[in-house]
Amino acid sequence: MAVIRLILCTLLVAVSQAEPFIGNNLPGRIPGPAIAGDLGPDRMEVVASSYGMTVAKLQATIDRDRDDIWLTKTGKLVYACKGSDDHAHHHHHHHRHLREEVRSIAGRQLMEPYFVPADAYHLHSRPGAPFVVHLDFNGEVVVAKEWVNESQYAQYALPYDIDGNPGSFSEAELYNIIDIWQQDPGLDVIERSGQRVIISADVEAEASCECVGEAFLGTFGNNSDIPSFVYSTRLDTYNIASQAAHLVGHSLGLSHDGNSSFPTFEGHGADYNSWGPIMGAPFGKFVRQWSKGENRDSNNTEDDVAIISSKIPLRPNDHGSDTGSATLLTTTECGNANVTTEGIISTAGQSDYFRIETLGGYIVAQVRGHQNTLPSLYVQVQLRDVDGNVLITSPPSSPTQAPSFESYQPAGTYFVSVTGIGFGDGFDTGYTNYGSLGPYMLNVQWY
């Protein structure tokens, strides 16, 4: 069956990483707590150098993620990302309830799904892009030497399966595949190069690593198919999507977000106001974002977005950021209009501007989620006069509500701006505008 491809944008130059640098002279995989002692200072320096780190930074990463990281025989770091029963299984039903309730009470605010099961084989976020992130659901014979070197034989990853029939996808499984593709948090803002994430119902592999996902550190775009693995048996569709983003983060060089109590931070808040970092363990949290450790007691302040953008570019701004460069929304001959357009907030605090010309009357604007996605982006929408001064700001809302305004104005030129904002203080509640990124749909009417 076809591999499901998730494509965002063109990347002209792929990044690379050094080939194995120690050789097959290590006795076997080394667990995190033993890495420094087994390698010794000289080989620690070689490993650190291969990742562009100092020995001190490598040691800090190993110490912080000691229970979730191991070293291969060839000296490469692999993350085995754990998902306890409390994290992965308990929140499976709770989070599904949240998603279904949001879709039922806010259907007018979120895009309806436009897909049928047969579409699952043809999903592309940005058709025509030559480099892709593959979400691979149909099983795979893994021949990448980085994985094979650990066992000396090719590995077969079982397909995604929820009904005990791995030989074909049922209608429910195809809808799940569509759901996972739609809801991959955090990945919409980056341009993508080659990376395969295998979604596998492999109970034995999951039990062997005692984890819900495995990924090599820093292998993104190295011109070799070194897949990551999401083990899906205990995860619902949004948690599968979130874990896929988490593993892509590792392949881009990101380590875990934790605190003094837990190596991977679950997040804070409850229900619709809950938040967690993608590189933590945000199972059951409604909003999941890239982070730089702004929450209380964070043990990792690395700047996720800066690290990602140092490897591959963020998606460019697709609309002007001030009145002089605003995107013009077309008016009918009668001076009325009902226009829907798409945009993306790819940097913290970014504003997109849209210009309208009205003969006088009501101006109504609403921003909603794109393709039925759950929110990693929270915005405010404002009406501005010809000089850019704010006339109306959408009232504060929760992450489940579409920000909007309605205002009666005389004839003239006006601007509608959409800005990524935070919710709560980001320390104990909610999040700042740092990770409030992603695609949106804007509808503007004037009459």
Image: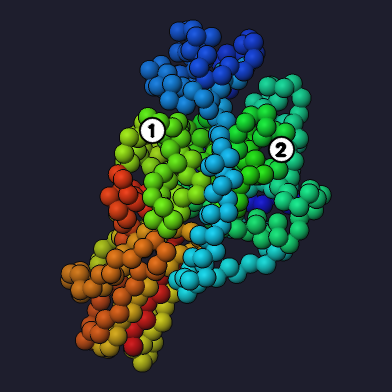
Q: Which residue is mark 2?
A: 203
Secondary structure of the residue carrying numbered label 1: loop
Who is closer to the viewer here, 132 or 238? 238
Q: Residue at x 70, y 25 (%)?
A: 148
The answer to whether residue 88 is visible is: yes
Q: Residue at x 62, y 41 (%)?
A: 230
Secondary structure of the residue carrying numbered label 2: helix
In the picture, measured across the screen, residue 137 lies left or right of residue 62, that is right
Indicate the position of residue 220 as horizontal and vertical percent values. 54, 36
Q: Residue at x 41, y 44 (%)?
A: 267
Amino acid at pointer 1: Asn
For the C terminus, give its image quadrant: bottom left
Who is closer to the viewer here, 364 or 85? 85
State which quadrant residue 401 falls in: bottom left
Q: CA distance from mark 1 to mark 2?
A: 29 Å
Amino acid at pointer 2: Val
Q: Residue at x 65, y 40 (%)?
A: 231
Indicate the position of residue 91 as horizontal and vertical percent values. 54, 49
